[in-house]
Each structure stands twice: as structure tokens, then as C-alpha cells.
Amino acid sequence: MTVEHAAELLRSARHGIAITGAGVSAESGIPTFRGEGGLWTKYDPVKVASIETFMADPASYWQAARERATAVLAARPNAGHVALARLEELGRLVAVVTQNTDGLHQDAGSRRVIELHGSGRTVACMTCGRREPRADVQARLDVEMPPRCRHCGSMFLKPTVVLFGEAMPAAEVQEAYDLAERSDVVLVVGSSLVVYPAADVPLAALRAGARMIVINAEPTPFDRLASVVIHGRSGEVLPEIAALTGA
Ligand code: APR
């Protein structure tokens, strides 16, 4: 019943948007942050992923990020990412707003992707601004910790992601709210919906009258606000929904 109901809502969507979190990439081998086996069950996010600790000791960030980044760089899109790209192709979705920094939506073929927390695929020097592909920096961590800027030698090389305590990218936030306020269906996938301001974007869609579909392995704080709630794995549920919307 629920996948059919979700498909029915998406079939009628004229301005559907998807909002995704780490759960959509879990089946690509990337650990989530919260929930079972989440990164924050092993590390204190404020200690390893805040701008304050990064500026105090970049090595502490790189040592904690190293393990996850290896999984991220090796990851490929799963059937969930592919189904979202297909829903966009079919005109059921106009965009994906993501909290993920792994770039897998774009790899799966999604054309309009708004990265609210930046991209982990690039690293920028905070001293001279020079940018490098993450893979290149990752490759020299065995001999250089923290890694240094190839141009100016600075040890403040930071991935272009939003760390805790850092401002969100203004243009992306604005675009996400514009999309939410025009949306008629909001499909929320694989997020615990506890991190703000990202979690306010689906609420903005609701405030604008959109219907909400939640797909998550565990209950979320927004389940009671949604028209359809599916507790399952997005890599299994999304292809089913895409198939029912006339893929
Ligand atoms: N399919 C669907 N949902 C899943 C799957 C799956 N295969 N695997 C896990 N989940 C669910 C978990 O139950 C959890 O509720 O995905 C959710 C992931 O939640 P978080 O780990 O909290 O990730 P997210 O909501 O994206 O975190 C928000 O917090 O740490 C910061 O910047 C980081 O962008 C991140 C933000």
C-alpha cells in the first residue's frame, strides 16, 4: 500500500523535490553518522568535525576523516541514487537537495543537485585558496599529516564541506528554500532529520502546502507530519516507487 501511495503522489507531482541524507548512501558502503554503526557512535563530532578543532589541529580532522574518506572515494551510486535520477528524468522530481558530500547523486545522473553541506571531492587551502582533488590529498596522508598546500605550504587544507560551527553556503540554502516553497511533493530519504538548518527545508515545503513522503530505515521526528512513511532501505524502496511511477 505505501509504495503505491508514494508513487501516486509522485505521479501527480508537478514540482516534486527530494531531500536526502547519509542513509541513501549506506548501501554504497558509506557509514552513516547516527543510528547503528554511525560515525558519531565512534567519534565525538565536535572533536573531529568542527571548524574550531580543525583550526586548532588539522591533523585531528584528517586522522578521523581518513577512514571514512577512503570508503567515500571508492563508493559507487546504488539503486536508490539511480531511481532518484530516473524520477527526475521522468519529470516527477525537479531537483535533489542533499546533505551528503559524496557526489553520488551526480554520478548516478541526477542533473539538479543542491549540496547543502558542500562537496567532499575537493580540498581548498584556507591560506591561499588553491584547490585540489580530494583523492590527491588523500593519497599523501601516509607521508604528510596534516597534508600541506602544494602551492603555499599551509597546513590548513580543508575539504570543501561544511564543518560544525561553519556557515552554510548561502546560495545553496537560498536555492533549497526556493525549491521547497514551490514544491508540491517532498520526498525525504535516509536522514535522521535532527540537523538544522537542513532539516528545516522539508518543513518549509510542508508550510508551503506540499505533501511529504518519508523513506528511512528507522523512525524520524517527521513521520507524524508525512502523508506516506516507509521504514525500509532506500536502495530497495526507491526503485519500486520509480517503477510504479511509470519508469
Ligand atoms: N536506507 C534508508 N535509510 C537508511 C539506510 C538505508 N539503507 N541506512 C540507514 N538509514 C537511515 C538511518 O536510520 C538514519 O536515520 O539514515 C539515517 C541517517 O541519519 P544520519 O546518519 O543522522 O545522517 P544525516 O541525517 O544525513 O545527518 C545530517 O549530520 O553529521 C552531520 O553533516 C552531517 O550531513 C550530515 C548531517
Image: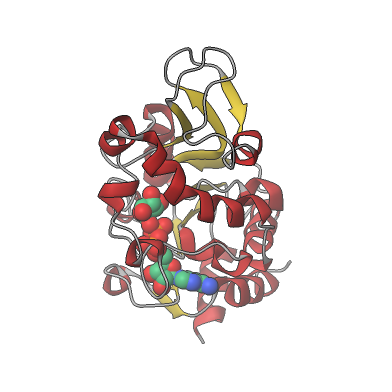
Q: Which sits in the foreground, 234 or 48?
A: 48
Q: Is residue 109 visible?
A: no
| Count of numbered marks | 0
Whether 224 is drawn above or below 147: the answer is below
Residue positioned 47% across, 48% down in the render: 65
Q: Which sits in the foreground, 62 or 211?
A: 62
| The residue positioned farthest toward the bottom in the image shown | 1
Whether 202 is drawn above or below 242: the answer is above
**Image quadrant of residue 92?**
bottom right
Q: Which sits in the foreground, 181 or 134?
A: 134
Q: Is residue 81 visible?
A: yes
Residue positioned 67% across, 64% down in the render: 78
Q: Which colour scheme appears in the figure?
A: secondary structure
Q: Position of residue 129 (x, y in %)?
A: 49, 16
Where is the C terminus found, in terms of image quarters? bottom right
Residue positioned 66% across, 42% down in the render: 111
Residue 39 shown left or right of residue 166 in the figure = right
| The residue positioned farthest toward the right in the image shown | 247
Q: Position of residue 215 (x, y in %)?
A: 46, 71
Q: Which sits in the foreground, 144 or 88?
A: 144
Residue 108 shown left or right of residue 223 in the figure = right
**Image quadrant of residue 191?**
bottom left
Q: Position of residue 14 (x, y in %)?
A: 54, 52
| The residue positioned farthest toward the front in the image shown | 143
Q: Position of residue 39 (x, y in %)?
A: 40, 62
* Quarter, ligand 1: bottom left
Residue positioned 44% across, 58% down in the render: 186
